[in-house]
Amino acid sequence: MIVPHMRRKNLEITDVNEMGKILDKTNTIHLGLNNNEYPLILPLSFGYEIIDEKIVIYFHGGLKGIRYELLKKDNHVCVQTEVFSEYKETITSATTHFDSIIGFGQAIELIDDEERIHGMKLIIKHCGFEGMEIDKKLFEKTSMFKVVLKEVQCKSKHE
């Protein structure tokens, strides 16, 4: 098990469709990559779908650069996102109301044009431009990756 057990089980979300609703509310994921001594965390636009009760994340980027190089060297990644709701005063201090997701998997570069176009359409849809046509020439300069989240922890705190 990669993800530690959640201490406060009353905050845990285990329904993958509820996790999807949280992903619908966020516009950025943070991708954690292995970068020798220290990890590298990058904010990314993304798309997703749920297949066989698993969250599948799609993201794109250049065919050169640190992200591409690190993914080619070690494709084990961590994906994280959160939706902030509000700060709330408590009797003794203050707290935050939020939803968060953290998951782990392997980033696989897509090379099939149909798969890449499918991933890009999911990204475009998530960004609010559903139905936009994707020209496969885009992938002459752009990589497309997918991550099937093997382990996921989702937390929702609104009380």
Image (cartoon, rainbow, N blue to C red):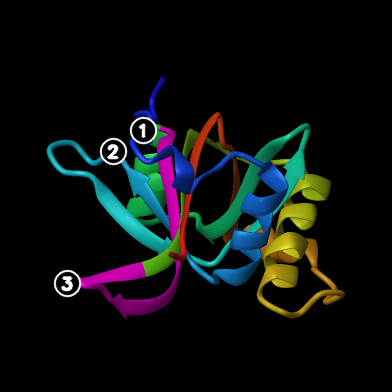
Quadrant in the picture for the N terminus: top left
Which circle's residue, 3 or 1, is located before the other in the chain? 1
Q: Mark 3: give few (<14), some (14-19) or many (20+) Cα within 10 Å.
A: few
Q: Quadrant of residue 74?
A: top left
Residue topped by disc 1? 73
Alpha carbon separation for disc pair 1 and 2:
9 Å
Percent of width and height locating residue 98 = 43, 65
Magenta span contains residue 82 = yes
Q: Mark 2: give few (<14), some (14-19) or many (20+) Cα within 10 Å.
A: some
SS category of the residue bearing label 1:
helix
Residue topped by disc 2? 34
Tell me which secondary structure the magenta stretch mostly adopts.
strand
Which circle's residue, 2 or 3, is located before the other in the chain? 2
Q: Mark 1: give few (<14), some (14-19) or many (20+) Cα within 10 Å.
A: few
Which circle's residue, 1 or 2, is located before the other in the chain? 2
Label 2 is placed on what type of residue?
Asn
